[in-house]
Amino acid sequence: MLRLSIRFFLRYTTAAAFAALAIVACQPKATDDPNPTETASFALMQDRIFATSCAVTGCHASSADNTFNQHKLVLEKSVAYSYLVGVAPTQPTAKAEGLLRVKAFSADKSLLFHKLNFGAQHHGGKTYGSPMPLGGKPLSVGQIEFVRRWIEAGAPEKGNVADEKLLDDTTPSYVETFEPLAAPAPGEGFQLKVDKFEVAPNFERELFVRRMVGNAQDIYVNRILLRARTNSHHLVLYDFKDKRLLPTVNEIRDLRNPNGSLNVATYLTMQNHLFLGGGSETNTEYVFPEGMAIMLPANSSLDVNPHYYNRTSQVLYGENYANLYTVPKEKVQRIVQMLDLNNTNLNLPPGQRTTVTKDFTFSKAAKIIMLTSHNHELAEKFVIKIKGGPRNGEVVYENTDWAHPLKKNYPTPISLSKGEGLTSVVTYNNTTARTVTFGLQSTDEMNIIFGYYYEE
C-alpha cells in the first residue's frame, strides 16, 4: 500500500512539474510576437515612417550619407533597430541630459520622440537640434502617437504593441504659429528683419537683404539674438569690407534662380561680406564677455542672410528677426572685431577622404575670445590650431557637427603676437561620384573660421 502511494505521488508531481514548465514556456517575452500573423509595430514604423521620411539618401539611409558623421544614425531597415534602442545620441543637449535615442518604456527620455515633435513647447522650449524630418512635413498626430506607444511598451523589435490604425490618422501634429521676436526697447538696441517669404517645393532658398540698422550715432553691440521659422538652415548677419560697394537697401537678392542655378550677381556681392554674427539654430543668442562689444558706426547697414530647406511638395515659409542689444560707450573696455578666415582652395576627389590645411597669420597682435567654424555636410572634422609662437600646433578648437558648429568661448583669450595666427585642418569625406570644390550651394563645400577678437 505504501509502495503504491509513493508511485502515485511521483507520477502526480512529475506531471505537475511538466505542466508548470509548459505554462512558463508559453508566457510571451518582451520581444516575442503574440500573434505571428500580425506585422510587428517596429516593422510598421519602419515601412510607414522611416522608409518614407528618414531613410532617404542624404539623411539616414546609410553610413555613406554625407550627414552620417554628424548624427551617426542609420535608419535603413536591416540596421535601424540596433542604431536606435538603448543607444546614446550625438546631439549635445540630449547627451548631456542623459537621453537615449530610444529609451525603452520612456518616451520622455527618448530623443527620437522629441525630434519628431516640431513644437519646442513639447519639450519645455529646449532645443535638441533641428526637428525631423529636416525640411520635410511634420509627422501626423497618429504617427507620433504610434511611436510613443511603441516606446512606452518597451520598444520591442518584434510584437504588435501599438494600434496600427493610428498610422492612418493624418491630423497635422504641428501648424507653425511663428511668433515675431519683440524689438528691443527704445535706447536698448535695434532690430533687423526679413519679412515672411515663400520657399518653393523641393527647393533650397537662400537670400540676402541689406537693412539699415537705424543708428544715428555710433553704437556698441554686446548681445545678438536671432529667431527663424522652422526648416531654417541658418541666419547670418554680415557687415561689409568695402563700404563703397553696397547692394541696394531692402532689395531681396536670391542666391539661386528659380531653376536652381547660381545667381551670379548675388554671388559677387558676397565677396564683400564680413561675418558679424549668426547661427544654425532657429533661436540663437550670443552675449559678449563683460566690458566687450562690437562697434557699429553711425548709419550702419548689415546684410541679413536667411537660408531654408524645403523637401516637401508644398510651399513653406521663411521669416527672420535679429536683435542687436547695445550698451553705453563708457561700459566698453574692449572693441571686438570679427574674424573671417576663408579657405576657398578646395578640390575634393570623389570617393575618398581629403584633409585640407590652411595657415592664416595676423599683421597685428590679437586676443581671440571666440571661435566657430563653417562648412557643409562632407566635412567630418574641423580642427583649429595655433600657428607660430610658444603654443605652435596646439589644438584650440574641434567640431564634428557641421549643421550645429560649436561656438567656443575663451574666458582667457588666446593671445597671438604679430606674425602668429591660426591653422584650419579640415577632413572631408567625399562620398559622391564627383569632384567637389568650394561653392555656396549645399552640394559644394566650404572651409571658414569665424570668431571674435580684439587687438592689443
Image: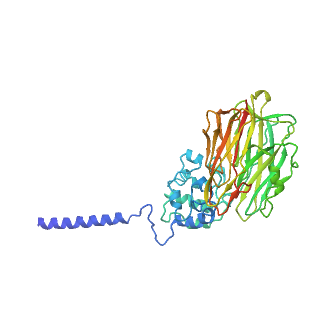
Residue 147, quarter of picture: bottom right
Q: Is residue 230 visible?
A: no
- Residue 152 located left or right of residue 237: left
Name the residue located 54 percent from the left edge and 49 percent from the top edge: 99
- Residue 239 located left or right of residue 135: right
Q: Quadrant of the C terminus?
A: top right
239 vs 350: above or below: above
275 vs 369: above or below: below
**Outermost top residue:** 330
**Along the line of sight, which residue is nearer the eye, 341 or 315?**
341
Name the residue located 23 percent from the left edge and 64 percent from the top edge: 13
**Along the line of sight, which residue is nearer the eye, 348 or 259?**
348
How far across and down, in percent of the image, does residue 108 sit?
56, 51
- Residue 51 located left or right of residue 258: left
Name the residue located 49 percent from the left edge and 57 percent from the top edge: 154
How far across and down, in percent of the image, does residue 102 sit?
53, 55
Q: Is residue 18 visible?
A: yes
How far across and down, in percent of the image, does residue 254 sit?
81, 56
Q: How many dots with numbers?
A: 0
- Identify the coloring: rainbow
How far across and down, in percent of the image, does residue 347 sit?
68, 55
Q: Quadrant of the N terminus?
A: bottom left
